[in-house]
Amino acid sequence: MSERHLGEDHSVVTADVAATEFADESAPIDVPHDVDGVVVLDYGGQYSQLIARRVRECGVFSELLPHHVGVEEVARRKPRGLILSGGPASVYSQDAPKLEAALLELGIPVLGICYGMQLVAHELGGRVESAEVGEYGRSQLTVHEPGVLFAGLPAEQPCWMSHRDTVFEPPTGFTALASSTQSPVAAFESRERDIYGIQFHPEVVHTPYGQDVLTHFLRDVCGCAMTWSAASIVEEQIARIRAQVGDGKVVCGLSGGVDSSVAALLVHRAIGDQLTCVFVDHGMMRKNEGAQVVETFRDYFKVPLVAVDAEDRFLERLRGVSEPEQKRKIIGAEFIRVFEEEAAKVGDAKFLVQGTLYSDVIESGGGTGASTIKSHHNVGGLPDDLKFELVEPLRALFKDEVRAVGTEIGLPERMVWRQPFPGPGLAIRIVGGEATKERLDLLRDADHILQDEIRNAGLYRDLWQSFCVLPDVRTVGVQGDERTYGYVVVIRAVTSDDAMTADWARLPYDLLEQIASRMINELREVNRVVLDITSKPPGTIEWE
Ligand code: XMP
């Protein structure tokens, strides 16, 4: 990974300029103490994060930990229950993650999902074998014995499967509850031992009764109160922030993105004017974006805000630069410089607010100090020689929960639902050429038309991102009987869940026509509009 980001849609900081050690990565997340929670152990499954999110959607706090954290680490959290996730391994392969037997002796209910179920079966003497035929995708579940998990649910129901190894016989003392097209034992339980297993994936939308099955486990087996909601932690977070910073001064880099905005507002609620926000306008923002940040935070919420108009500085540094990584590095380094200068003016600020999310925490080691599952570019961002102690009020929250908190504390809808925007901003959307003021202004105007039309069509929230790209290319056209030689604007609109993969959005033809004709009519320099129909992979979302 060649770069590090300040936050989801914050300014980029390159590895060259950022120190590689980041404060506080290993700290456990702040587990709210007055709500029931469960631990989800991650055995490497594709959907592990989704399990943790679905549990929270049921109203139960959940933490996702790597499978090897050890039983003490799990017990320390005093969970009401334990869920073992799926994973790609076979219980018979040499290097397969093993089930620590003590996890079944914690005195709390255990639910194994997919590989998690096979681990339990294998550990307790059931029969797990590789089946002749794998079972991938949609399947049909037949419930023979509802037990507690399927109480009140249809005997026949669709479910989503993804496995080759299969449980052929449950361990002694367990009751087989269901079978599926290719799984003789697709669910089992032992009420006595309080251990449960399901082969299918309850967390995906293709298992329509999955949320019910999870609810039965969480409410009827674990006895959870189901009262967790992201909004319910606002008061608790405020108390924590107060306890952490006392009467110290705090700075926050505000980008206008969801994460930094929600983090800043929460901290302001907690400590008022001890907080100063710094918004660096590098001149690569979208139309009116800087003004909106100032209006919202300074004028409306009365948050002390330093808004720095650094456009000239950034443009100067970017002069003659067309190589994308170089643009990123320059912008990242300059951002730190400007931020440091402004933070120094705040006086003896000891704390820095970061909009780190739970998904960042998980992906950099699960909040346990354990080794990294996946390296991730979102954690950290500012070099640690800035010597701030971090305040991270969103560390326990998934993105959708951050939006819920944002709504709860009154952040305008426009900001709560803002699409992600890259730290280097429009500079990396002027491709193959230098980001000059003239081109940035043109791109800003084209982008404004696109956003306007997408919002009017009611599609803004359905898209992961929608934006324009301005290649450094001119093409010939004819307008009003005259030859033109103008810019090409590219429309890029994608759907995605997490930006790891994306599909190009099938925007209605009439809408595309309206966008194109507005761009060509309203923007003199543009004479052609094209649509990018590349998914990711093989393309990336951004062009640079
Ligand atoms: P790609 O283009 O890699 O983008 O498919 C994936 C997501 O990351 C955003 N992105 C960035 N965000 N600094 C950022 O803060 C960057 O340098 C950067 N490059 C890409 C992109 O907008 C998309 O959401």
Image (cartoon, helix red, strand yellow):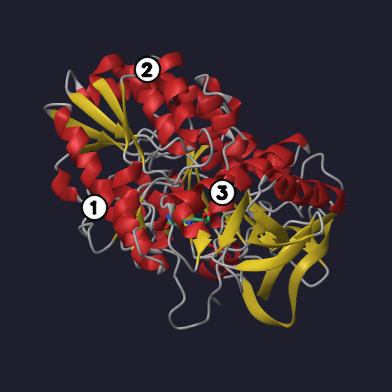
The residue drawn where x is 67% and y is 42% is: 449
Which comes sooner in the sequence, label 1 or label 2?
1
Residue annotated with mark 2: 269
Which amino acid type is marked by label 2?
Arg
Which comes sooner in the sequence, label 3 or label 2?
2
Which amino acid type is marked by label 3?
Leu
Comparing marks 3 and 2, which lies closer to the viewer? 3
Tell me if the residue at label 2 has its CB under 8 Å from ligand 1: no
Which comes sooner in the sequence, label 1 or label 3?
1
Alpha carbon distance from label 1 to label 2: 26 Å
Element at label 2: helix
Position above or below: 405 against 166: above
Which numbered marker is on residue 22?
1
Which numbered marker is on residue 167?
none
Residue 22 vs residue 43, the one in the foreground = 22
Where residue 541 appears, as percent x and y from the top left, is: 58, 61
Residue annotated with mark 3: 442
Residue 488 vs residue 152, the one in the foreground = 488
Where residue 430 appears, as percent x and y from the top left, is: 51, 59
Element at label 1: loop
| Quadrant placement of the N terminus | bottom left
